[in-house]
Image (spheres, rainbow, N blue to C red):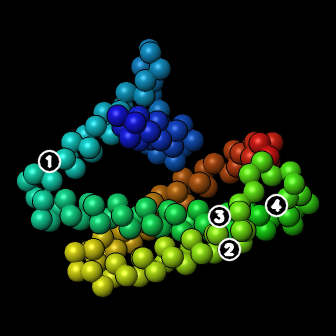
Amino acid sequence: NSGLYAATRMLWSLSKNEMAPAFLKKLSSRGIPLNALILTISISAFSLLTSVVAAETVYLWLISISGVITIIVWMSICVSQFFFRKHYLADGGKLEDLKFKTPLYPLVPILGFGLYGIILISLIFIPEQRLGIYCTVPFIIFCYTYYHFKGKKRVSTNTQTETKISETM
């Protein structure tokens, strides 16, 4: 239930920020992002169906792709945190002004990135997981390409976003 809620709201938020198709930002009279909910349920139903119909192939691919993407996301979080602190200090920010200070910084993000990298590389040696890496690369290229072309249309809103980010610190 929480996963369904989170995925639906994530699609709605992406759409609202013009990073997903516009039809997903429509809300019902009760404030429910119905199109995003229907799409999320459809994808979930398809995934569930593959666990029954094609458990040895499609379902395994979906699980592998999901795992690889999760690893890449966490690696990105580690890199983002490392560079955030670097740029924050370069822009005149003070460590004591941060609401959360990472214990053992910079060891934690570097160690996290390295360990996730080892896991990602080790997946290459597991035949069942290898396809997940092969499928994830084109998926990530598609996402970056989509964002690149959509992002050019949003240049004027980027300064507003940067202002909002700096105001939250």
Give the percent coordinates (x, y) of residue 119: 42, 76
Residue beneath disc 4? 88
At label 1, the amino acid type is: Leu
Badges 3 and 4: C-beta atoms under 8 Å apart?
A: no
Task: Give 115 or 35, whichever is nearer the viewer.
Answer: 115
- SS for callout 1: helix
- Is tag 3's residue or tag 4's residue first in the polypeptide sequence? 3
- Outermost left residue: 53
How dense is the environment of label 2, judged by Cα within 10 Å: few (below 14), some, or many (20 and up)? few
Residue name at image x 43 percent, y 23 percent = 32
Looking at the picture, which amino acid does disc 4 mark?
Tyr
Q: Are marks 4 and 1 in contact (CB under 8 Å)?
A: no
**How many C-alpha atoms fall within 10 Å of the one at disc 4: few (<14), some, or many (≥20)?**
some
Q: Earlier in the sequence, mark 4 or mark 1?
A: 1
Q: Which mark is residue 107?
A: 2
Q: Label 1: which residue?
A: 49
Quadrant for residue 123, please give it: bottom left
Residue 104 can be seen in this image: yes
